[in-house]
Amino acid sequence: MKRHRQTFEEIESSLMPVEASWLDKHAEEVIKLLRKIPRRKVYTSEEIGKLLDKDFDTAVTTLRLFLDISKDEFTQGMRDLLGKGGMGVTRYQKDRGTFLSALNSLGLPEAMTTAINHRMHWSDVLVERLKGGRGSAIKGQTRGRGMEDFVEAIVRNVFQEAQVAVRCRFEGANGQSDEKADFAIPTAKDPSILIEVKAYGATGSKQTDVLGDIARIVDQKRHDTVLLLVTDGITWKQRPSDLRKLILLQNEGKIARIYTKSMEKELHADLLTLRAENGL
């Protein structure tokens, strides 16, 4: 093969949109099912059960559209109501009544009644496009920033403003490299305490990203720098192996402690202790 020396301009000028259709076989079946649902003033478990009886997988996707929740959120919500075990067709067929009761508890009949009897306006279509595009990203960003704001309020309650570096890059142990962290105390140049905040389900906070970010912090920080992790999100329950990896890092002492929002008091108390121990 002949050797070439390509340029940015050459490649850029040849770029074309990569076309892809969102419509696969499953989506086509969901659309068909949506169009077959009869209009009623009120929907009950009886109508929902008939949908699931005919084609369980297609019906579940359809029902999630009425609830406006993701697959992970739906699965975890049903699991919280039904307990351990699968959430597929076998579980449904084994205990149909309880399964339908759980869907009722999620508010499905009301959601169907509202959606199907809603008088459409042309702007509704555009609002859904906005929601599915920009709205999806905003929702994830809001989750992440909400967690950061939650932790920042606690941190600033304990430490002086000048002692808190927010969303910074701290200097690594070798003094020649750095790494990002959500909070560095008392300075980013020589932190005694590092705090990383991850809301699973937030944009840029996939579980693999969390593990990678934590691993980089662990690799860069001094061994005597305390690293705290604050995380939350029920979708962790869908990927327990990754959560176990974080817990293993904590058990090995690479993370001092992992907190969730429900552990607010513990986080506040531990920060007070660290302030005293570090003379801050």
Image (cartoon, rainbow, N blue to C red):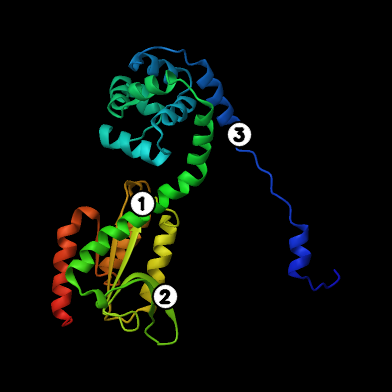
Pick whichever of labels 3 and 1 is earlier in the sequence.
3
The local secondary structure at tag 3 comes to loop
Within 10 Å of the Cα at label 3, are there few (<14), some (14-19), or many (20+) other Cα atoms?
few
Quarter in which the N terminus is drawn: bottom right
Q: Which mark is residue 179?
A: 2
Q: Which mark is residue 24?
A: 3
Compared across the picture, whether 33 is left or right of 19 comes to left
Against 109, residue 136 (above or below) is below
Foreground of the two, 190 or 82: 190
Q: Determine if residue 83 is in view.
A: no
Q: Residue at x 32, y 50 (%)?
A: 233
- Under mark 2, the amino acid is Glu
- Under mark 1, the amino acid is Arg
Residue 136 pos. (x, y %): 46, 45
Pick whichever of labels 1 and 2 is earlier in the sequence.
1
Residue 239 pos. (x, y %): 38, 50
The local secondary structure at tag 1 comes to helix
Pick whichever of labels 2 and 3 is earlier in the sequence.
3
As measured in the structure, the alpha-carbon distance from the residue carrying label 2 to the one carrying label 3 is 41 Å
Residue 118 pos. (x, y %): 43, 21
Viewer-side label of 1, 2: 1
- Under mark 3, the amino acid is Asp
Q: Residue at x 27, y 64 (%)?
A: 152
Within 10 Å of the Cα at label 2, are there few (<14), some (14-19), or many (20+) other Cα atoms?
some
Foreground of the two, 21 or 46: 21
Against 21, residue 142 (above or below) is below
Residue 234 pos. (x, y %): 32, 46
Question: Contact (CB < 8 A) between labels 3 and 1?
Answer: no
Residue at image mark 1: 143
As measured in the structure, the alpha-carbon distance from the residue carrying label 3 to the one carrying label 1 is 30 Å
Quarter in which the C terminus is drawn: bottom left
